[in-house]
Amino acid sequence: MSEAVGRQGRPESSSRTIVPIEQHSLLSDQRTAAVVTPDARVVWLCEPRIDSPPLLAELLGGPDTGFFSVRPLEPAGDPVQRYVGHSMVLETSWDAMSVIDYLDCSEGLPTEPAERSRLVRVLTGTDQALVEFTPFPGRSNRLECSADGIEVRDGDTHRVRLRSSPDLEWHIESHGRGDIARAEVDLSAGPVVLELLCGTGADEHALAEPQRRSATITHWRAWVDRLALPPLQTELVRRSALVLKALCHGPTGAIIAAPTTSLPQELGGSRNWDYRYCWMRDASMTAATLVRLGSIDEAMDLLDWLLRLIVSGGASLDRLAPIYTVDGEALPPEQPEPDLPGYGGSRPVRIGNAAEQQFQTDVFGPIMELIWRLGRAGAPLDERHWRLVELLVDAVGQRWQEPDQGIWEIRAAPRHHVHSKTMCWTAVDRGISLAGTTFNRSVPEWERLRDIIEAEVLAEGWNPEANAFTAAYGSTDLDSAVLAVGLAGLVPPDDARWVSTVEAIETQLRRGPTVYRYRRDDGLPGEPSGFNLMTCWLIDAKILIGDLDGARALFDDYSALAGPTGLLSEEHDPVTGQSRGNFPQAYSHLGLIENALNLAEASDL
């Protein structure tokens, strides 16, 4: 029986210790995602979609802003957390109790429109457990008891329900900003199933919980077990691949950069951005990495998404926005969320991303690289894809000479970024290869365009004073993104200019296990941490110049940055030794996979 009690009660103190970013874990149903602490608190969940307003937001605001916790009633020491098999099903265990958490992937849910989701928590053991649930007050702040659990009032509707067994006694208390529901559970009487049901029809299913859990495990395991994994850090590579799959939006084929917003690049700072969207650059790189592992479906789905964007949405490739929502729409205007004080007090928490309005010419390169990898993998490319190749090269021809904001989305005046020019060269170069090997076309005019871009990059991008390729034409500042000059093949690996660039970046931008993007003033207050993808690019660069020992040592250091369950954030702070930025980040995981593949190939493993 459920019971409402009117006493005043508060969630745990807002002084609760901040959990390091890398110690969290992820749940996914490929439509939304949840972030879970090492002690089984769900502290981030947006519904019905990954970029919807949060239902649970403790990650960015403390206990008053929404969490769903399950723990022993009495102190029971530190739990152990692991993923179950090769899946995204999470288990947290104490001595006398455990909880299995998953976002239900049974009955085709991962490809359904994001209108309903089911977060399932299964408690087992011999201990007494305490369950607490409070939603984000900015979204919904009133709870009501029902015959089988708790109803979350959202205006005049009940889109969200916490379903439990009818004999579980709930107590609802007010904590000023909203309500919190609590229940004590005797696990010695048998397993207890809690289901957070979001959306219309979320409670409609034909399978019992054990069958749904099994189907969810199978959804992930059947996919990942088909991959061709390298013999280096195999378990971490497998987990990274699962993270990338979890970031693929099943209903549309879009791929998001990360499932969180505004986890800070500098603790207490303002470099906090919303990454819950599809960047064509990040998405293409993610899909291209999965192609290397032997899975082409994600890449084909992403290209279908892009083709729909062009054909149905009227997007012009030469005016392609850097970012879209998962359904191909414009982002909401960037604005702060005033009800969230931020992770560790890092304000503002941003919703939306103003980089959508920027011009970034580098985006053409990763898209074409993806199509090129698909062609090499024997994917079923057709005339639609050839037309996309033509449109990409045409877009490069129209816009490659313009300055842009670049891969780092600098919120300052556009520059002629060397990385962006290199990616324009890459788009044309891979287009030429595709024309000849996959589509049986002759494109001599593309060869001339490629040669023109290459000549300009070598003339304007190289700076004798810095003895390196630099961030932008006419500048002396280093930028680790220019490693792309060699990684993409614009110059051969033994080119003295590129080798000296690699050495300069290692000397000036590397700090221990991490590599900074740059160290110049970018017009924003504070300073970001080391960028994980740039560490991966330096590893790949060291492989190319023949420094296999150095590459392997840095790869081992980088791999050690993963959290207890194998997840990586966007950045790493070498001063504190902690992760920074949104979590988990596609860039960081795809970079690790590429490193492992490249090291294995170079070492003949």
Image (tube, rainbow, N blue to C red):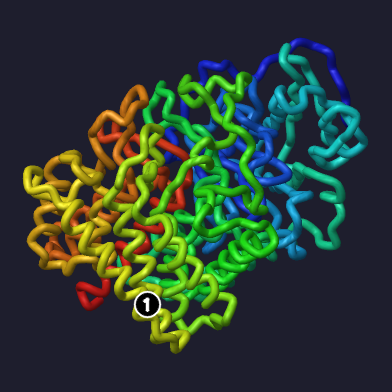
State the image quarter where residue 434 is shown: bottom left
Residue 389 is at least partly visible in this image = yes
Q: Position of residue 500 (x, y in %)?
A: 9, 54
Q: Quadrant of the N terminus?
A: top right
Tell me which amino acid carries mark 1.
Ile
Q: Residue at x 73, y 36 (%)?
A: 186
Q: Is residue 431 left or right of residue 502?
A: right
Residue 555 is at least partly visible in this image = no
Q: Is residue 452 left or right of residue 299?
A: left
Q: Disc 1 marks which residue?
A: 432
Tag 1's secondary structure?
helix
Q: Residue at x 41, y 41 (%)?
A: 409
Q: Residue at x 78, y 43 (%)?
A: 198
Q: Residue at x 41, y 61 (%)?
A: 396
Q: Position of residue 362 (x, y in %)?
A: 39, 54
The residue nearer to you, when weighing 332 against 574, is 332
State the image quarter where residue 96 is shown: top right
